[in-house]
Amino acid sequence: MPVAQETELTVFATALLHAAGYTPDEAAQTARLLVWANLRGADSHGVLRIPRYIEMIRTAVVRAGQQPTLIREFGATCVFDYGKAPGAVAMMHAAGKAGDLAEKFGIGWCGARAISHAGAIGYFTTQLAGRGLIGIAMTASRPLMSYFGAKGEALSTNPLSIAVPRPGDADPIVLDMSTAAVALGKIMAAKDSGNPIPKGWAIDANGVETQDPHAVAAILPMAGPKGSGLSLMIEVLSSVLVGNAIIAPFLRGEKKGGFNGLMLAINPAAFGDTSSFLASMESLAGAIHALDPAAGSDGVKLPGERGFQTGRERMANGIPLASGTARNLADAAVQLGLAVPAFLH
């Protein structure tokens, strides 16, 4: 299995995206997001996405060089239209705006209209936690997942992330979850690796559960009606609220695509003494860590903790790449006239 160092993989990913048509800054920001996911072990949201990102810019699903347009600003809230800019760029801009509003008003909400695929959204909430703020992110897109009790695709796998800072150099607590039984990227990763998928992840064209990643017609919602209900509400908050609905037009036959996002920042200082809040967070973290592990468990961990541990290991030992992913990246390099780096051989 090929192994890449974080720096060389980021440089290569940046070069691929830039050669495909992303501006230098867009390519660099997108590469950092993708490699961050690989570092954390979320390979489904890492560089395996690059061939699809190249296709998206070629088909104008993503548009390079777009400037954000302020649609509305009202107190601690704002809405920007990003003109299908790369998701990493749009959501980082929205996170910055939400953070600035939170530092001024105690809370900041930025609606991100007309973005593109934003990858592992825990990346953006982690940036806010690094500013000492609580970060909340959501994104919405076209149907990929079934609605509980209905056939076929009806909702997206709309993700939700919440990151909370901790004192000093302690890693933040980062929840980053899909509203589906599994993220689409994990099915893509199974295709790349040639592995079957577990039962309960997806259904085929007949609505029957399948373990063949190549036969997937729709992903199942997480926890049945809970997953589809949460996804529906993320569509409301990320899309309907900012005047760019996706699901209803699509289900009416308009086949409207696109992506929207939401960044919310909360300043703990607005609710009391920040040092007391951080001390309470450390007390909560300690209480969770002190729980007795269940039989067969490798330890009780906080949300995001395993990802940070994996990140430190991969920074030291390199990032493993599935053979299918390495092959697809090498093919993309050849098509774009770039040299194939040694770590892909």
Image (spheres, rainbow, N blue to C red):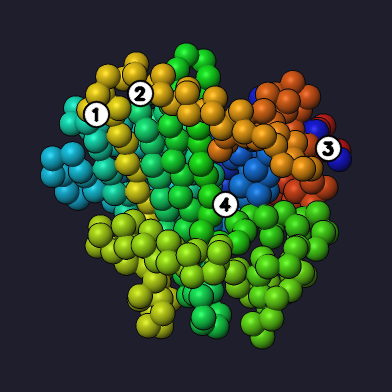
Question: Which callout, 1 or 4, points to the residue nearer the camera?
Answer: 1
Rounded to the nearest angstrom, the CA distance separating label 2 from label 1 is: 9 Å
Location of residue 186 in the rendering, given as x and y in whole percent from the top left corner: 67, 55
Q: Are marks 2 and 1 in contact (CB under 8 Å)?
A: yes
Identity of the amino acid at label 1? Phe
Residue under pointer 4: 53
Rounded to the nearest angstrom, the CA distance separating label 1 from label 3 is: 48 Å
Residue under pointer 3: 2
- Of mark 1 and mark 4, the one earlier in the sequence is 4
Location of residue 193 in the rendering, given as x and y in whole percent from the top left corner: 81, 54
Residue sitting at the far bottom: 206
Q: Is residue 40 above or below residue 151?
A: above
Residue 41 as seen in the image, left or right of residue 167? right
Q: Are marks 2 and 3 in contact (CB under 8 Å)?
A: no
Pick the front one: 114 or 220: 220
- Of mark 1 and mark 3, the one earlier in the sequence is 3
Location of residue 162 in the rendering, given as x and y in whole percent from the top left corner: 44, 41
Residue under pointer 2: 277
Give me the residue at 70% from left, 37% from top.
293
Pick the front one: 279 or 145: 279
Pick the front one: 168 or 310: 168
Residue under pointer 1: 271
The local secondary structure at tag 1 comes to loop
Rounded to the nearest angstrom, the CA distance separating label 1 from label 4 is: 41 Å
- Of mark 4 and mark 3, the one earlier in the sequence is 3
